[in-house]
Amino acid sequence: MRNWRIVLLPALLLATTASMPPAQADAASRKVLVDFRKEGGFAGLNDRVLVYGNGCVRLSRRTGPAVDKCLTAKENRTLRTYLKKLRIGGSEPRPQGADFIKYTLAYDQRRASRYTLPDGWQPVVRHLEKIMEKYWAPD
């Protein structure tokens, strides 16, 4: 009687994952490597770059759809080199006034938000901004 479970369970699992679009099946198994957000300013920025451990990214902006792409091997290596040197540190208090851009980085179970870009964050942030400019395009 138990033999049918051994056969049916893997077949059922295969059928449910096969019916899911590949992007959804991948998304369920991907772990976020780094999460970068750039928000604020008079323009109302709301940019987000999620980089997954498998080297793929999800890019989104305030306007337009989210875009899923995979980094080249060189882009992925460069990012990981920068991340090895990254020290998140603490968050910075919100400054008085308006038109400030808030940068938020989450990496290695740490998250911080800054209004001035620290020297240690610059290589990572600049690289992620280049990735956003290269791959994000509204349909």
Image (spheres, helix red, strand yellow):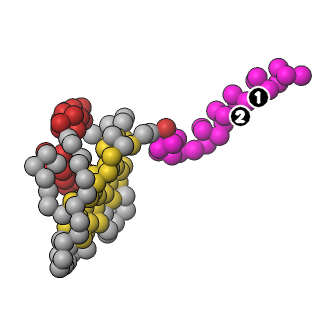
Q: Residue at x 85, y 22 (%)?
A: 2
Q: Residue at x 80, y 26 (%)?
A: 5
Front one among 90 and 116: 90
Q: CA distance from mark 1 to mark 2?
A: 6 Å
Residue furthest to the left in view is 119
- Magenta span: predominant SS is helix
Rendered image: mark on residue 12? 2
Q: Residue at x 21, y 42 (%)?
A: 87
User: Looking at the image, do the residues carrying marks 1 and 2 touch, with CB atoms under 8 Å apart?
Assistant: yes
Find disc 1 in the rendering and name its residue.
8
Where is 54 relative to 38, above or below? above
Front one among 108 and 130: 108
Front one among 4 and 29: 29
Amino acid type of the residue that numbered disc 2 sits on in the rendered structure: Leu
Q: How many marks?
A: 2
Viewport quadrant of the N terminus = top right
Membership of 62 in magenta stretch: no
Where is 60 relative to 31, above or below? below
Q: Position of residue 23 (x, y in %)?
A: 47, 44
